[in-house]
Image (tube, grey):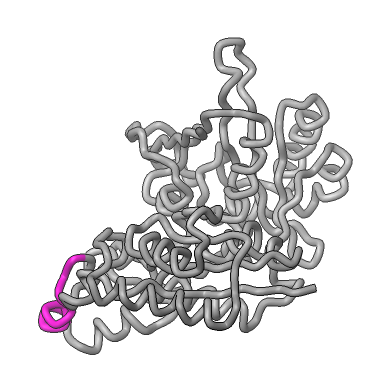
Amino acid sequence: MERLLVLVRHGQSDWNLKNLFTGWKDPDLTEKGQAEAKAAGQRLKALGLNFDIAFTSALTRAQHTCRLILNELNQNDLKTIREQALNERDYGDLSGLNKDDARAKWGEEQVHVWRRSYDVPPPNGESLKDTVARVLPYYCQEILPRVLRGERVIVAAHGNSLRALVMVLDRLTPDTIPSISILDDNDTQRRIDELAAILHDCVTKGASVNFMNPFTMTEAVSFFKDTAEAVQRGEVVLFAALENDQAVGTCQLVPAKKPNQKHRADLAKLLVHSHYRHKGIGASLLAAADQEVKRRGLKLVTLDTALDTAERLYERAGYIRAGVIPNFALWPDGGYCDTVYFYKWFD
């Protein structure tokens, strides 16, 4: 079976030309960048390549590059999926700054660390590690299955999102691909100790998810026994992230019961064991929940989370911040906790 995956970085953008940090900002290609994209398409054509599907980011420079390449291949009508998960690394407070000015402000060594280290983000931005955690789940769930089926795939994206993907491809094995399952009530009972361990770990380490410390494993098991019954009644869809056939993360989709809210659901109890964080598991769980929402024909998902905790995870998954209620809940240690509400609309 022929398998083909082609990765292409976008051509020169206007901000590349001006030596500005770009990130999630949205400048278009320069004339040089357009010529570079056309040249890439011509090289692919010379190799006799064509594609079954294209992926690109939500940013103009990558989309424009993709269109120009497909035009050179006479594949203007090829299905093209535009996805925020493939966006460039978010440079946060550096975005829009001249790189020389940034070095003058923070020092060359600090800017070098922000740009080239794996796990040190710029202020209010993403590290490469954060970018991997965003790119990996999308690749595993949306792109990789197509490649394995024998489809010919092209991805037009960005330097750092492709760098993250190449790192993943270099070390990817079946055991390291996040596996997300929907558990029925029997599965939940079978994995109840694993699920309870995730909840216990999160609460004892400070997560505000309705429980107070001291929080026992007995309480955690009791919660998931109730969840198993709700799953059996069809009131909850329970997701589990599995690594080596062990649950290491979980979340719940709770369809609304009221007659005038049948179009929506709540997302609840998104939990990842502390030993397995920063591997893209939270993003994988959100992506799996999205797929189930679409399968059920739902239109709206709402959620709430403690302020300054998982907000960036939800925003990167396309959730929109609706507002904050001060002192809405308590932290497990008893202190007041502000709560932020998010929603996501599915067309």
**278 lies left or right of 161:** right
**12 lies left or right of 307:** left
**67 lies left or right of 223:** left
- Which of the two residues, 264 or 329, is positioned nearer the viewer here? 264
**163 lies left or right of 123:** right
**Residue numbers of the magenta segment:** 96-106
Q: Is residue 289 above or below residue 236?
A: below
Main secondary-structure element of the magenta-colored stretch: helix
> Residue 45, image x and y in percent?
53, 77
Residue sitting at the far bottom: 109
> Residue 154, image x and y in percent?
55, 68
Residue drawn at 36 percent across, 62 percent down: 64
Residue drawn at 67 percent across, 77 percent down: 172
Q: Is residue 32 above or below residue 217?
A: below
> Residue 136, image x and y in percent?
57, 66
Quarter residue 143 falls in: bottom right
Q: Is residue 103 magenta?
A: yes
Residue drawn at 63 percent across, 29 percent down: 297
Q: Is residue 231 magenta?
A: no
